[in-house]
Image (cartoon, rainbow, N blue to C red):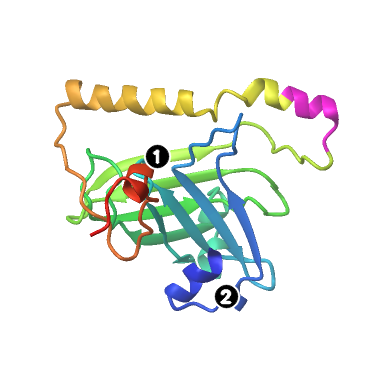
Amino acid sequence: MLTKTWCFQGADPNEWPYAYLLAVPCVNGQVDNPLGFWYLYNADKKLTAIIPELNTSYGERRMWLVRQELSPTSTSSKENKKSPYSFRGRFTKDIHVSPFMPPSGWYTVDTSDPCAPLKPGQLDILVTLTSPEGKPLMVTRVTSSQPGLDVPRASMLEKISFLARWWYVATCTVMTYRILSEAARIYFMKSARYWTRREPEKTALGKSARTVERYGYPYH
């Protein structure tokens, strides 16, 4: 999948020999992973690009190759040393995600390096959606509350403790409830504008055919 994305966007796969995937895990056979991030590292293990992988509720998928916009000089300055973000990139929004957001605009992603040697496993991701007119429409942030769990080195007690505290967070039931409750609040209380879904462009992967679509239509 990564190689196809690189080649489709005119990049050389050999530029990034290392990749790190950040995504929602499968829990009890269920998974709801609307957005994942591939962190791409060059031969010197420097974070130089990311691939945001968007999966819509309609079963469509869109992957963008986003290169680093921060220069080495800017990341080493005093002001940016205090910032948790070591990567910034922008990419165009060209797929329907939410009925309360326009289908066009662009995203800006500021993120820390999850594989940084000083803070391994520490996450801080800031995503800003900007309208075509240049106005910020949505700002969302994901941060880690505790150090990551190194599964191969963790003891059985640490693994059980981790699952006991976090198993319910990633389940589809919880995710679906939160999405629907927030959508209802925005629709009924905020009276937000509503955008209908448009068909995805060629840059996106279409949804898989349903059973009725595969077998329910007669051939002519």
- Alpha carbon distance from label 1 to label 2: 30 Å
Residue tagged 1: 140
For the point 70% across and 47% down, the residue is: 120
- The spot of residue 139 in percent (x, y) is 35, 41
The amino acid marked with disc number 1 is Thr
Residue bounds of the magenta highlight: 154-161
Nearer to us: label 1 or label 2:
2
Residue 81 in sight: yes
| In the displayed structure image, the side of residue 70 where residue 81 appears, left or right | right
For the point 44% across and 42% down, the residue is: 34
Residue sitting nearer the eye, 15 or 141: 15
For the point 55% across and 70% down, the residue is: 3
| In the displayed structure image, the side of residue 113 where residue 200 appears, left or right | left
Residue sitting nearer the eye, 185 or 67: 185
Residue tagged 2: 13
Residue sitting nearer the eye, 5 or 121: 5
- Secondary structure mainly formed by the magenta segment: helix
| In the displayed structure image, the side of residue 101 where residue 54 appears, left or right | right
For the point 15% across and 37% down, the residue is: 194
